[in-house]
Image (cartoon, grey):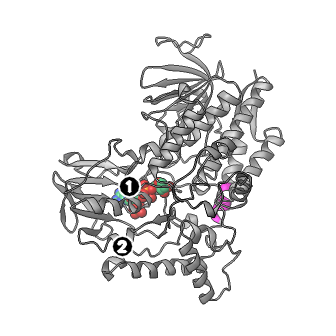
């Protein structure tokens, strides 16, 4: 219950701000800059970690690296920033990206508005004052007109509930919560559960350190070579004056990463020609095969199967033991409908004497014991166990904030049958709450910094419009939400994506409603829609005067 001065009965006084931003990664840092430095609002970032960086603060496992080129995986909002920073590698590693985000925090004097080591424990909308009451685990309360979630899509780690895990005498780790001080596995018998993106990045590194590495695989993954190199200034793209061209090319491409040589269709193309083109894309590295080969790769099952077969043949060439190669070979799911994975020495790691691959689909994990892990087929003695088991994507971190909207309704309950929102940005019943790269925006299937900047700009412009027009609240209507959900679903259903169990669908979390959570018509189309909504006087939003 709130009183007029923003105090809540029985609790301490609230600090009044215009906006609370939750998270200090790529999204939170730029959102703060926009609101505080461009709009002149009193904005504060609350961040659970002890440093800025978000994903790149937490995911410090050996081998962590971005898999779109560094020059594209950067902010574009400041020409000066772009000139002041030079990436050392084509695909930057986690320490360098973290340094970059720290550089940005200093460059724009952001730290003075960021509360580190502080977690939001509740955010409750007060209908009487049209503002949010935000509580933290440090006992602080903030009263804000706007709350902006910059918590990221993949920040709530998922550790499956294997029986006996608490009995394990060794150390356990989750790749998404890697110790800041690092881990030395020298001489240890290490187990890793999972063969998704993060496992595929870290396995080659851990194998070099551990006395033995046991990889527990449930599903094989299609992985293509990253092809990282030191940055090559001759390649261009980040010189003075090149930023505008690069930005335009990013927006022209479906995933925000330019592949100008993408071919429109692989239909009717001879097998020889396809293979030759796949080979070129393979050599190009990164997401070239997935996002730069044929525009209908993720629509046409027959073409997709040809790409899948191409990758299967490559795995066979790389892995010496045919039985291990076969186990590492994905079958029965279209290529690229789970998050595409880039690798560096992953397959070759299974040629090492100190690495064992264990099939936990054939013989599932039964329990974790004090000294290791028991499957239905064997017991594996381990000193350390790594969970590379992914994230409760999109919704996990939002739910963790205990968000309550109109009528005290909890977001968890409101989304009991699955998340729903408008444009990925706004939720009916939760006024003045904005979600950067929320579910149903292009988010993880678009260049994240580009999508983040577009969202932050849109949110900042909308808040500016509200302030100008003296509006008290802005909220998606139920009708707009329903129409958006239908549009996102209709687009997804045209593709092969929903045919595969993936975290895009929530299928990796037991009991999570299955809803495809990414807008798939590309960032450019998405941006056009967001701009049209504004031009149409915020079509689909209820705007309430103060
Ligand atoms: P992912 O890609 O979700 O991979 C998780 C892996 O863990 C995957 O191999 C899963 O197998 C495996 N997993 C998950 N739960 C279990 C259980 N219960 N038993 C056995 N194996 C399990 O997570 P990542 O962290 O690698 O990557 C997430 C994103 O972070 C990535 O896409 C980038 O965007 C950054 P499954 O395939 O479900 O059979």
Residue 249 position, x and y percent, is 71, 59
* Residue 187: image location, x then y, percent: 19, 57
Q: How many marks?
A: 2
Answer with the quadrant where ligand 1 appears in the image: bottom left
The residue indicated by pointer 2 is: 348
Residue 170 placed where, x, y %? 20, 49
Secondary element under disc 1, as helix, strand or loop, is: loop
- Position of 251 compared to 96: left or right? right
**Magenta stretch in the rendered image:** 488-493
Question: In the picture provided, is 455 more to the left or to the right than 101?
Answer: right
The disc at residue 295 is none
Residue 379 can be seen, yes or no? yes
State the residue lying farthest toward the right. Answer: 536
The image quarter containing residue 522 is bottom right
Majority SS type along the magenta span: helix
Residue contact between numbered discs 1 and 2, judged by CB atoms under 8 Å:
no
Task: Say which element carries label 2.
Answer: helix
Q: Is mark 2 within 8 Å of ligand 1?
A: no
Can you identify the residue that label 1 sits on?
389
């Amino acid at each position: 219950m709130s009183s007029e001065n923003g105090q809540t009965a029985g609790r301490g006084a609230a600090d009044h701000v215009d906006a609370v931003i939750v998270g200090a990664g790529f999204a939170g840092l730029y959102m703060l800059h926009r609101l505080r430095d461009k709009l002149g609002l009193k904005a504060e970032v609350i961040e659970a970690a002890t440093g800025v960086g978000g994903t790149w603060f937490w995911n410090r496992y050996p081998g962590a690296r971005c898999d779109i080129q560094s020059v594209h995986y950067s902010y574009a909002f400041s020409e000066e920033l772009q000139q002041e920073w030079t990436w050392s590698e084509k695909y930057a590693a986690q320490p360098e990206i973290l340094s970059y985000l720290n550089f940005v925090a200093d460059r724009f004097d952001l730290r003075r508005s960021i509360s580190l080591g502080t977690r939001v424990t509740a955010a409750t909308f007060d209908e009487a004052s049209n503002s949010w009451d935000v509580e933290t685990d440090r006992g602080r309360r903030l009263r804000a007109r706007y709350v902006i979630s910059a918590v990221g899509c993949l920040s709530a780690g998922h550790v499956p509930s294997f029986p006996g895990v608490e009995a394990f005498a060794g150390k356990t780790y989750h790749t998404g919560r890697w110790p800041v001080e690092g881990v030395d596995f020298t001489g240890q018998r290490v187990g890793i559960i999972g063969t998704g993106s993060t496992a595929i990045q870290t396995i080659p590194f851990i194998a070099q350190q551990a006395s033995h590495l046991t990889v527990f695989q449930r599903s094989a993954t299609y992985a293509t070579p990253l092809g990282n190199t030191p940055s090559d200034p001759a390649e261009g793209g980040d010189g003075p004056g090149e930023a505008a061209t690069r930005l335009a090319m990013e927006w022209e491409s479906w995933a925000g990463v330019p592949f100008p040589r993408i071919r429109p269709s692989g239909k009717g193309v001879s097998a020889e020609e396809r293979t030759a083109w796949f080979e070129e894309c393979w050599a190009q590295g990164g997401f070239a095969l997935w996002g730069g080969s044929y525009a209908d790769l993720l629509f046409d099952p027959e073409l997709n199967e040809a790409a899948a077969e191409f990758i299967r043949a490559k795995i066979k060439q790389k892995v010496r033991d045919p039985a291990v190669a076969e186990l590492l070979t994905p079958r029965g799911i279209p290529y690229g409908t789970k998050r595409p994975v880039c690798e560096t020495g992953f397959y070759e790691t299974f040629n090492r004497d100190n690495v064992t691959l264990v099939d936990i689909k054939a013989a599932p994990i039964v329990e974790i014991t004090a000294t290791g892990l028991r499957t239905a087929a064997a017991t594996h003695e381990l000193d350390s166990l790594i969970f590379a088991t992914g994230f409760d994507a999109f919704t996990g971190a939002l739910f963790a904030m205990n968000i309550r909207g109109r009528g005290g309704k909890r977001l968890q309950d409101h989304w009991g049958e699955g998340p729903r929102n408008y444009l990925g940005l706004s939720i009916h019943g939760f006024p003045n709450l904005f979600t950067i790269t929320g579910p149903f925006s292009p988010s993880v299937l678009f260049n994240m910094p580009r999508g983040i900047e577009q969202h932050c700009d849109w949110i900042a412009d909308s808040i500016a419009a509200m302030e100008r027009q003296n509006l008290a609240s802005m909220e998606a209507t139920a009708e707009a939400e329903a129409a958006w959900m239908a549009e996102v679903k209709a687009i997804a259903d045209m593709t092969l994506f929903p045919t595969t169990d993936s975290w895009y669908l929530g299928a990796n979390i037991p009991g999570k409603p299955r809803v495809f959570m990414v807008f798939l018509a590309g960032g450019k189309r998405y941006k056009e829609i967001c701009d049209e909504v504004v031009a149409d006087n915020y079509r689909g939003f209820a705007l309430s005067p103060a």
